Amino acid sequence: MNEPRRLSRATVVVKWLSGFLLATVLGQVGVLMWLRAEPGIYRNGRPFPPPAGYTIDGRRVHRSPTACYLIRVTSDSCPYCRQDEKEYQLLRTQAKSAECTVVEVAPMAGDIVAAFEDRIQLEFIDAEFAGALVPYLTPQTLIVEGGILRWHSIGVLRGPDVSSAAGLFRGTQARAGSSRSVLGRY
Amino acid sequence: MRVQQVSKATIALVRASGLGIVGLGLLVTAEVRLASLNVAEWQRIQAARDRVQYQPNWVRLTTGGPGGAADPSPPSAEVVALFMLRVSSLVDDLRYWNQVIESVESDNTKSVWFLGVCDSGDSCTPQEPIGFRIEGFLEAAQARPVAMAQGDLLVYRDRRFLTRLARAVEPNLTAQALVGALR
């Protein structure tokens, strides 16, 4: 005779349990979305001082606040930096067509030895740029335009990274008339 | 007989709850999966914060300039102290650090070599004689901690990081803190 009463009490418990589980699942989804929106090292859309410093061959590079830059933190001795050479080459081509200057930054002096004519290779930087750039990870790739960080990728570049950057460069290309490359200014 | 009753009761319970066994199982699985994703995301954020706040425990003073790469510090410098100069408050900063250096030199027997790092490259040109050297360009790995120190004093002994001293309002307090740290 007690069975239906016990059953209904247990039913309430199970209902509470499922309600609790559902609520915590929804809560966890919310927490996950919030955590994913948290930036890692950089936050796109934030001010980012353009690069300035001295190149590996001792040339001075001046800051150009309005210019567009493709910045790559890299080192000759970093094996990961060679893994995405194809993707990086593609980005450089897109950057050039959008009149963006390609700037490579060595974390430490002597990290970049191989010289290339088509890019600026910085060995020394000023504190303003250093305050924004975290140089302890290689490779990393950033797009800075008009003093704002537009896009970044930490680690080896993948196909989707190049695609997302390409869309940005198309927009930059449209604005290229008003911004000038700093190549040749140092 | 007892087992049968329990099984029946369980089935009835699950039906009554509106969720099938599969539904409950899915909820539990989702719970576990989401928890692991959240932990991974939290770890990613912590790792990123660690990277941003990273403070190398060494100093390597290779500077860039018109004369090429060079280490401006004298080989005899046992203690190296780095601080940032802001162009926007250059006159005050120069006066402040000059006073710190004067106090340290009158108080301390150890050889401390001071280097001011300009926050904007070669824009920090002093109008009067100063008691320390100014550099505008460092290696990225060394420029970063100076920039992150926000005007505080970074002290290295035998090229290893010793301490970070907050910039006190009064220069002699900063000097005292440095002398104390070196004892």
Image (cartoon, coloured by chain):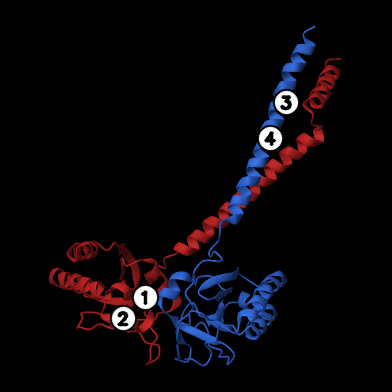
Chain colours: A blue, B red
Q: Earlier in the sequence, mark 2 or mark 1?
A: 1
Q: Residues within 10 Å of mark 4 (few under 14, many from 20)?
A: some
**Which mark, residue A14?**
3
Is disc 3 placed on a helix, strand or loop? helix
Q: Is residue A15 above or below residue B84?
A: above
| Mark 2 vs 1: CB contact within 8 A | yes
Residue for badge 2: B124
| Mark 3 vs 1: CB contact within 8 A | no
Q: Earlier in the sequence, mark 4 or mark 3?
A: 3
| Mark 4 vs 3: CB contact within 8 A | no
Q: Chain of mark 4?
A: A
Q: Residues within 10 Å of mark 2 (few under 14, many from 20)?
A: many
Circle 4 or circle 1, nearest the eye:
1
Residue lying at 69% horizontally and 46% vertically, measured from the top left: B33
**Which mark, residue A21?**
4
The amino acid beneath tag 4 is: Leu
Q: Chain of mark 3?
A: A
Circle 3 or circle 2, nearest the eye:
2
**Distance from the alpha carbon under mark 3 to that under mark 2:** 71 Å
Is disc 2 placed on a helix, strand or loop? loop
Residue lying at 58% horizontally and 70% vertically, measured from the top left: A150
Circle 2 or circle 4, nearest the eye:
2
The amino acid beneath tag 1 is: Asp
The amino acid beneath tag 3 is: Val
Left or right of B68, for residue A175: right
